[in-house]
Amino acid sequence: MGFITWVNSTVKKAELSWVDVKLLQLCGAGFVLMIAKLWEPLLSLDWYWYAVIGVLAGIKPTYKAFGK
């Protein structure tokens, strides 16, 4: 069983609503911000590096959602 299959089955078993999923995403964002706060060189990047990272991270899910 792959990781994604495991996550999907766990979400279905727990009967998580979209609010629960969004709260988990917010939890992940908070964790990333904590890591960024603790490791200051990460925050010293120019703004466009964050934009590049965001665009690159969004290519595959966007393609999967709208490309088919």
Image (spheres, rainbow, N blue to C red):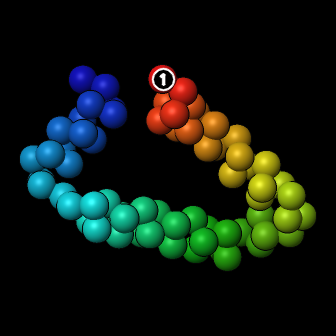
| Residue shown at 52% from the left, 67% from the top | 29
Residue 62 versus residue 7: which sits nearer the camera? Answer: 62
Location of residue 20 in the rendering, given as x and y in whole percent from the top left corner: 26, 65
Location of residue 13 in the rendering, given as x and y in whole percent from the top left corner: 10, 47
* Image quarter of the N terminus: top left
Q: Is residue 39 left or right of residue 31?
A: right
Location of residue 9 in the rendering, given as x and y in whole percent from the top left corner: 18, 38
Residue 13 versus residue 65: which sits nearer the camera? Answer: 65
Location of residue 23 in the rendering, given as x and y in whole percent from the top left corner: 35, 69
Q: Is residue 6 left or right of residue 49?
A: left
Question: Mark 1: few, some, or many residues within 10 Å (few <14, many ≥20)?
Answer: few
Count of numbered tags: 1
Image height check: is 43 above or below 7? below
Q: Amino acid at mark 1?
A: Lys
| Residue shown at 78% from the left, 55% from the top | 51
In which quadrant of the rendered view does residue 42 lie?
bottom right
Q: Is residue 9 left or right of residue 28?
A: left
| Residue shown at 26% from the left, 31% from the top | 5
| Residue shown at 37% from the left, 65% from the top | 22
Residue 36 versus residue 57: which sits nearer the camera? Answer: 57
Image height check: is 48 above or below 65? below
Q: Is residue 51 left or right of residue 15?
A: right
Image height check: is 3 above or below 16? above
Circle 1 sits on which residue? 68
For label 1, the SS is loop
In which quadrant of the rendered view does residue 25 lie?
bottom left
In which quadrant of the rendered view does residue 12 lie?
top left
